[in-house]
């Protein structure tokens, strides 16, 4: 955002609004919490001696800073304040050092953003079963649409499958065509009228192919009252927020298993990025950077972000606090620590004990609220979490593909 300063020396606020011969413009980057002087704008001072003012010059002064979100001045009259605030420009009557005032204002902006984010979170938590944290009764349902077959990373513990028996993430009866999404949601609502959330959680990654966006587009057009919710590893998340908002996505879950490339290399064998297969530290650095950037972009846009972390004993169990601190700083609202399911390359690592999970949650809880009720849902789950899964009824008799698109 931009700020206008009535300062003659770039060090202190020196003028009343109507007396200022120019305004110094400051650009504030809220995401990095930094600022810099941008330009000096000459101003036709509107006030004369004795308090009289030139109405036309006063209007030009206001037009001069119309692209700013706030103006710092020593004083301003009531009519001027009212007109500026009518245009959405905050007025701060204050004196003092410019650097101190701007840095305090950045802290204020951050707190205001956190308040708005918390308000949105509380509102969604009343109807989203994976955000409630006990704040609402467990009587809301969700349906996962298994439209995303492809994945752009390979985790060493991930083993995707199409079957009806494995009760874990990355598994579905089959792959649903995006064109069928609205029809399936209609059937899901008949089976579970309490359904409030339509999610895409695999079996691959929601942004590794266009199918999730198409499914959301169709469902949102038909059922705009439902919450669209997406899970992703975050590699392709940066830059996608406008598209996601356009199809109704209000909540995103990003899986972040490390914020240190050395640790992440033990968890992720490779990524596919920019048309290249990348391994090692390079892959880890790109994935971590994109995850945190995507979380920040989503949060700044008003989307609620939850982060999943798979707890892997001996690998990232001593790294949990660092993850929690980084994701909280990026704007995530909720953290879900999941126990490793030993399989694929990590099949010989034992699942963490309850004590290990509780210890990890205690460390992470110093930075971000913890979600304690995850059910390790399948990619085609349907119904109220913790109650009977209706996916077998939802897809009963329906021919489903097996990783043939994406």
Image (spheres, rainbow, N blue to C red):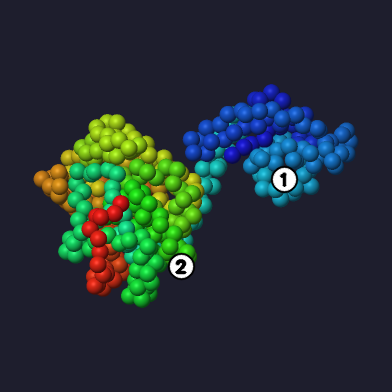
The residue positioned 65% from the left and 40% from the top of the image is 68
Residue closest to the eye, 268 or 1: 268
- Of residues 49 and 337, the one nearer the viewer is 337
**Residue matched to label 1:** 84
Crowding around mark 1 (Cα neighbors within 10 Å: few <14, some 14 to 19, many 20+) is many
Query: Measured along the vertical axis of the image, is residue 226 above or below residue 63?
Result: below
Location of residue 158 in the rendering, given as x and y in whole percent from the top left corner: 21, 48
Query: In the figure, 38 relative to 134: above or below?
Result: above
Horizontal relation, residue 18 to residue 12: left or right:
right
Farthest front residue in view: 404
Residue 313 visible (yes or no):
yes
Residue 384 location, quadrant: bottom left
Q: How many marks?
A: 2
Secondary structure of the residue carrying tag 1 is helix
- Examine the image and state in which quarter residue 169 appears: bottom left
Question: Where is residue 100 shown, x and y percent of the image?
Answer: 58, 31
Q: Is residue 128 left or right of residue 174?
A: right
Sequence-first disc among 2 and 1: 1
Which residue position holds label 2?
222
Q: Is residue 308 visible?
A: no
Q: Quadrant of residue 51?
A: top right
Q: Quadrant of the N terminus?
A: top right
Residue name at image x 76 percent, y 35 percent: 16
């Amino acid at each position: 955002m931009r700020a206008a300063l009535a300062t003659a020396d770039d060090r202190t606020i020196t003028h009343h609004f109507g007396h200022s011969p120019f305004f110094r413009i400051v650009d504030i980057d809220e995401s990095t919490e930094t600022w810099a002087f941008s330009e000096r704008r000459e101003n036709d001072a509107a006030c004369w001696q004795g308090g009289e003012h030139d109405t036309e010059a006063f209007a030009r002064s206001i037009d001069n800073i119309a692209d700013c979100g706030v103006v710092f001045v020593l004083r301003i009259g009531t009519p001027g304040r009212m007109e500026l605030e009518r245009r959405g420009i905050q007025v701060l009557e204050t004196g003092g050092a410019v650097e101190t005032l701007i840095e305090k204002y950045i802290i204020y902006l951050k707190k205001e953003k956190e308040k708005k984010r918390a308000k949105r979170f509380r509102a969604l938590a009343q109807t989203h079963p994976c955000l409630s944290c006990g704040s609402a009764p467990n009587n809301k349902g969700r349906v996962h649409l298994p439209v995303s077959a492809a994945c752009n990373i390979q985790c060493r513990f991930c083993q995707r499958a199409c079957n009806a028996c494995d009760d874990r993430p990355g598994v579905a009866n089959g792959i649903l065509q995006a064109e069928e999404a609205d029809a399936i949601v209609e059937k899901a609502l008949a089976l579970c009228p309490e359904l409030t959330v339509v999610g895409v959680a695999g079996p691959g990654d929601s942004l590794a192919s266009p199918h999730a966006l198409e499914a959301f587009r169709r469902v949102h057009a038909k059922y705009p009252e439902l919450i669209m919710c997406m899970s992703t590893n975050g590699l392709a998340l940066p830059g996608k927020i406008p598209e996601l908002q356009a199809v109704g996505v209000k909540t995103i879950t990003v899986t972040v298993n490390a914020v240190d490339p050395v640790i992440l290399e033990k968890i992720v064998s490779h990524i596919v990025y920019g048309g290249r297969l990348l391994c090692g530290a390079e892959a880890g650095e790109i994935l971590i950077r994109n995850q945190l950037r995507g979380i920040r972009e989503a949060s700044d846009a008003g989307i609620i972000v939850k982060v999943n972390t798979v707890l892997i004993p001996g690998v990232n169990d001593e790294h949990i606090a660092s993850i929690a601190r980084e994701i909280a700083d990026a704007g995530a609202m909720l953290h879900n620590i999941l126990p490793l399911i030993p399989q694929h390359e990590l099949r010989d690592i034992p699942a963490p004990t309850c004590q290990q999970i509780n210890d990890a949650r205690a460390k992470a809880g110093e930075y971000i609220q913890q979600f304690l009720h995850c059910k390790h849902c399948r990619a085609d789950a349907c119904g109220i979490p913790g109650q009977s899964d209706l996916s077998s009824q939802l897809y009963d008799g329906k021919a489903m593909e097996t990783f043939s698109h994406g």
